[in-house]
Image (cartoon, rainbow, N blue to C red):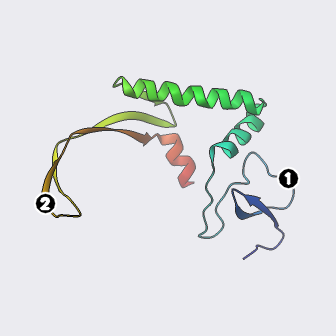
Amino acid sequence: MRLPGTRRVRLSGRQAAYPPGPPRDGSHIFNIGREKFKMNKKELIAIIAEKAKLTKKDTEKVLDAMEEVIAETLKNHGKVQMVGFGTFEVAERDTRDGRNPRTGEKITIKPTKIPRFKPGQGLKAAVNG
């Protein structure tokens, strides 16, 4: 279904209805009714580059460095806090019992560490209103 006064544009192989005129401030990624759109890394880089007035290559380097720093910090049992955005941290899962889905026999699942993201107040406010 196309909204009146919109145009069709392809975004990651899916169609999106944009408001008339040029997109403003990355607002061209939004929900229409119940249909949700996903943004891939390439699209994220393009939007950040446009907002920060950087080249896409420089923006990609910054995003890659950020991913690397966060991963390295979590690997060393650290925590990355970005006030207003959220916190990346490591959570530990204890040893637990499980079942082999093929045979049904009981197995013990080893303890593991998993990355977690806890959204901050600013991000929650942006999403909810």
The residue type indicated by label 1 comes to Pro
Q: Residue furthest right?
A: 21
Disc 2 marks a residue whose amino acid type is: Glu
- Quadrant housing the C terminus: bottom right
Relative to 8, 33 lies left or right: left
Image coordinates for residue 95, horizontal then vertical, percent: 16, 43
- Reply above or below: 51 against 65: below
Whole-percent x, y for residue 10 in the image: 76, 60
Q: Quadrant of the N terminus?
A: bottom right
* Residue under the point 13% across and 60% down: 105
Query: What is the crowding at mark 2: few (fewer than 14 residues within 10 Å), some, or many (at least 20)?
Result: few
Report the residue at 45% width, 29% height from top.
71
Q: Which mark, residue 89?
A: none
- The CA span between labels 1 and 2 is 59 Å
Residue 39: x and y in percent read: 63, 51
Q: Residue at x 59, y 70 (%)?
A: 34
Task: Name the residue nearer the viewer: 120 or 96.
Answer: 96
Q: Quadrant of residue 28?
A: bottom right
Q: Which residue is mark 1?
A: 22
Callout 1–callout 2 Cβ contact below 8 Å: no
Select label 1 or label 2 by which is in front: 2
Kind of element beneath mark 1: loop
> Which residue lies under the disc numbered 2?
105
Horizontal arrangement in the rendering, residue 59 relative to residue 83 (left or right) = right
Q: Residue furthest front?
A: 103
Q: Position of residue 47 (x, y in %)?
A: 72, 42
Q: Residue at x 36, y 22 (%)?
A: 76
50 w.r.t. 103: above or below: above
Compared across the picture, whether 49 is left or right of 7 comes to left
Earlier in the chain: of badge 1 and badge 2, it is 1
In the image, residue 13 sits, relative to residue 113, either above or below, namely below
